[in-house]
Each structure stands twice: as structure tokens, then as C-alpha cells.
Amino acid sequence: MLDVASPLGILREFTLVISSDGVRHNCRIVWVKESVWAFPSYRIENLETAINADHREDGMSRFVIALMICLTTSGAMARASGQAQARLVPLSSDQYSRFSPAIRSALEMAKRACGDEYITVRNGFLRYLQGAPGEEFTAVHFDEIGCARRAELCSSNRCLHRVFVIRAGLQREVWRGKVSEIDMSIVAGIPSIKVHCGGYDHSCCRRLIWNGSRFR
């Protein structure tokens, strides 16, 4: 996991080089939570960007950082570890302009339903999962979006969540529901969504598998 000041300019695939040890780790982004990026280890062809560790840091610190970023895992997870930022902040016009039309439309829908003048968000309102080559999933978590009329998006313990896929330059919605939380992950090489109901209600807790068109 890597904390960054801004996601702008960060490659989705790179090679981490610890110069003092000569160790190289091939890394690929699997989820993004605003300023937090997570990477499991993958074999990467024809792409190499060197990131040199600070010589002044001790060897153990560099090892821990490399392990956190490039640890090989059995399933790539899209849900961020740690708590999202509690404070709502206005979404800047620059940030908004970088979103796809489908994501902007989803945010505008929420703003109209809530009767808000501005879109306010917390870290983690968008999360990403890399699927097959050329395929990326984006989850919009409306519990992390400000809303004056909260009941329009959420009930007592469930909120709207929507998932989009982009493929061949086209993005479309492939799942939506009012639940406590969803986790996107890669299970046995296949994208999936784990749906959480919250509390002791297990009636809707289930795992949905991507069939190439929808999550079922």
C-alpha cells in the first residue's frame, strides 16, 4: 500500500528498485482510494520505471515498504484498508473533469436527489479494480458522498453502491444496490463483488461473479 499526495502522474505499472540492495519488484495497481494506492506483485512486460529508495533510510524500513507494496497475494482486493477520511470536502472542478461521463452522471444524479449545490466527498468514494487486459471496474460508494437529504441515498444501515466497467473505451453500469458495503476483488482470476448487509443481517450477504457482461 502506498500513500500519495496526488494520484496524478502515477503509472499503473512500474518497477520498484531498492538501489542499495539491487532488489527489483514489479508492481501493478489493483485498487485506488483517492490518495492511497495498493499493489500486489505481477510479472510486467515492456514497462519499467525506476523508483529509488532513499539511501538514508535503514534497510529494514525499505524492506517493510517493499513488502507492503509488492507482496504477492492470491486475490487482488479493491477495498481500501484503514478508515476513509471522515471530513467531507468539495469536489474540485479539476477532479470532476477527470472523471468519465458515466461517473460524472452518477455524481450529478446524487447531487440532484440530495438537493445540494456542490458535490462533497470523502476519501474512498471511488474505488477501482483492474480486471482482464483493457478492463477496469469502478465502484461509486454513495455513503462517502455528502447528501442533505440522506434518505435519498441511504437507509438506516445501507447506502447506494454502483459498479461500472470500462472496456474498449466504453463505460457502462454493471451492478447497483443499497447495501452496507461492497468489496471488489479478483478471485481465481475472475472479478467479483462481495456484498455486505451490515450488522447481523446476513440475508443479502453474497459473492457475485463477473460473467463478462454482469455480476451474477
Image: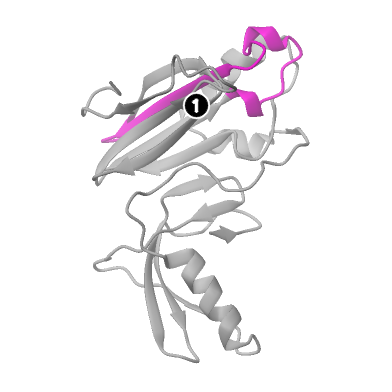
In the displayed structure, 102 sits above or below 30; it is above
Residue at the spot 28% in from the left edge and 29% down from the top edge: 209
Q: Which of 209 and 148 is in front in this view?
A: 209
User: In this image, 3 relative to 130: left or right?
Assistant: right
| Residue linked to disc 1 | 103
7 or 189, which is in the foreground? Answer: 189
Q: Position of residue 37 (x, y in %)?
A: 52, 54
Crowd band around label 1 with a 10 angstrom C-alpha radius: few (<14), some (14–19), many (20+): many
Asked if residue 161 lies left or right of residue 146, the reply is left
Residue type at numbered disc 1: Ile
69 vs 135: above or below:
below
179 falls in the magenta region: no
Q: Is residue 155 magenta?
A: yes
Q: Give me the residue at 54% from left, 74% from top.
A: 64
Placement of 159 over or under 3, stated as above or below: above
Q: Say which quarter of the image contains residue 131.
A: top left
Pick the quarter of the image with the C terminus.
top left
Position above or below: 88 against 132: above
- Please tell me which residue lies in front, 166 or 19: 19
**Splitting the image into 4 quarters, where does residue 53 fall?**
bottom right
Visible residue check, residue 83: yes
Q: What stretch is highlighted in magenta?
A: 142-170
Side of 132 where 40 appears, left or right:
right
Q: What percent of the width, then of the height, locates residue 99?
A: 51, 34
Residue beneath the point at 47% across and 22% down = 162
